[in-house]
Amino acid sequence: EVQLVESGGGLVQPGRSLRLSCAASGFSFDDYAMHWVRQAPGKGLEWVSGISWNSGRMGYAESVKGRFTISRDNAKKSLYLQMNSLRAEDTALYYCAITYYYDSSGYLGYFDYWGQGTLVTVSS
Amino acid sequence: DIQMTQSPSSLSASVGDRVTITCRASQSINNYLNWYQQKPEKAPKLLIYAAYNLQSGVPSRFSGSGSGTDFTLTISSLQPEDFATYYCQQSYSTPPTFGQGTKVEIK
């Protein structure tokens, strides 16, 4: 059974940093591209970042480019999101998601499975 | 970025009704269109990928159609467990983008 368990969320002041983690199990981690997708309270879904299976390619939404960094550790079957210079508008539930069939970008595709999310609240 | 527009934003329907949700892309995305279901306080779940392919385990009352810029998700006979919010998503070009969602409520 595919399991994706996010952690690391919490309340943080504007301008500070936070690191999210996603622990994966139940599938061949190396075969999948990985993503972070967020959902602000009461709002829709927004893709944040994606990474190829071997970390060779990464992509970011314009809203987080230069502030967030995605990474993965295939040996630990884990995905990470380093979030710096956090803003109030980054407040959201952050989901980890996986993609098996990706295109030449190395990560673009549909999201086969999602974790339950970890909540990030940016407020003073 | 490719903009995805869903209609309607919400709808009320009864158990047994046929429900249709539309998704329009701001440019042609061939058939790179996917549908997700999200229930309250739950993670999204993939229903349909590449416009019309049913994800494993998804009931056959769900179906998808369309290509180019216009796509449709149809629920042939609405069941109590189908009351949820539905999102379309394009995987034609990065960044992947979602529609704003369609909330299906009980009439």
Image: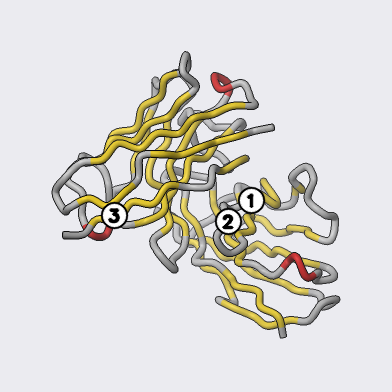
Q: Name the residue under label 3.
A: A90
Are the numbered discs 1 and 2 placed on the same chain, yes or no? yes
Q: Which chain carries label 3?
A: A
Which chain hosts label 2? B
Q: What element carries label 3?
A: helix
Asked if marks 1 and 2 touch (Cβ < 8 Å), the reply is yes
Residue under the point 85% across and 70% down: B77
Residue under disc 2 on the same chain as residue under disc 3: no
Look at mark 1 in the image and give the residue it sits on.
Answer: B45
- How far apart, in angstroms, are the residues tagged by discs 1 and 3? 23 Å
> What residue do we see at 48% from left, 28% from top?
A106
Report the front residue among A51 and B50: A51
Q: Which of marks 1 and 2 is in front?
A: 2
Numbered tag placed on residue A98 in the rendering: none
Image quadrant where residue A40 sits:
bottom left
For label 2, the residue is B42
Give the residue type that dot 3 points to: Asp
Give me the residue at 62% from left, 62% from top.
Answer: B39
Cα–Cα gap, marks 1 and 2: 9 Å
Could you tell whether B50 is left or right of A31 in the image? right
The answer to whether A122 is drawn above or below residue A111 in the figure is below
Q: Check chain identity for marks 1 and 3: say if they share one.
A: no
